[in-house]
Every structure is written in C-alpha cells, then in structure tokens.
Amino acid sequence: MGDLAEVADELAAEGISIAAISVDSVEDSAALAERLGVGFPLLSDPDARVIDRYGVRMKGETLAVPATFIVGRDGTLAWRHVGERALDRPPLSQVRQEATR
C-alpha cells in the first residue's frame, strides 16, 4: 500500500483514483490510513463480501490475497493482478502502465 501512496498524486494528475479495501473495521482502516499517511480511501469490508465477490479470499482465511484491480471509466474491469502470497504484488511500473492505457 505504501508503494501506491508514492504514486497516488501522479495517477491523480492523470485522472486516476486509488482506493484500498480490507476486512479491517472502519476504525482500524482509518487508523492505518493516518499512520501510513495515505491520501486515498482505505475502505472496510469486515464481512468479506467484496473480497468474496472478487474471488480474492485467501484459502481457509478471512483475509484477501494482495490484488490490484483497474476499473475503467465505464465501470468495467480493465486489468487485474491477483497475488498468490502476502507479498506478491505487481511492480508499480506495471500498475502505472496498465492504469494509463
């Protein structure tokens, strides 16, 4: 998430918004956003409904695997990367490239 914070302003200049989501409570998400100093929303999904809908729940867990989704202006899914492990994330250069297509 810290990596995305580094490019949030750059992507915002391109008209691209970032949001993160986790199973943490609203309060925990707000505290994390403050602690990390991120300038984008950290959304809360304590019932894991969104995580399940996107199919990114870790097997046998209540957590999601790291996943990055790019949604186009028309609301359709333009690109996605779903990690297999906790640290499996796409490089920022790839996210930038996919987001600005």
Image (cartoon, helix red, strand yellow):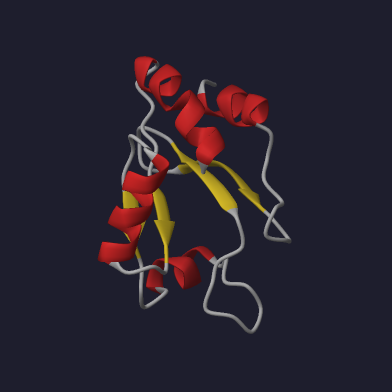
The one nearer the camera, 78 or 62, is 62
The one nearer the camera, 29 or 63, is 29
The residue under the point 39% across, 73% down is 49
In the displayed structure image, the side of residue 7 where residue 66 appears, left or right: right
In the displayed structure, would residue 7 be above or below residue 54? above
The one nearer the camera, 15 or 25, is 25
In the displayed structure, would residue 47 be above or below residue 64? below
Total marks shown come to 0
Across and down, in percent, residue 37 comes to: 37, 38
The quarter in which the C terminus is drawn is top right
Across and down, in percent, residue 8 comes to: 42, 27
In the displayed structure image, the side of residue 24 where residue 57 appears, left or right: right
In the displayed structure, would residue 30 be above or below residue 3? below
Across and down, in percent, residue 38 comes to: 38, 38
The residue under the point 61% across, 62% down is 65
Across and down, in percent, residue 93 comes to: 65, 24
In the displayed structure image, the side of residue 99 where residue 15 appears, left or right: left
In the displayed structure, would residue 7 be above or below residue 89? above
Which residue is the extreme one toward the front?
Answer: 35
In the displayed structure image, the side of residue 57 where residue 20 appears, left or right: left
- Figure quadrant of residue 12: top left
The residue under the point 39% across, 27% down is 16
The residue under the point 43% across, 22% down is 11
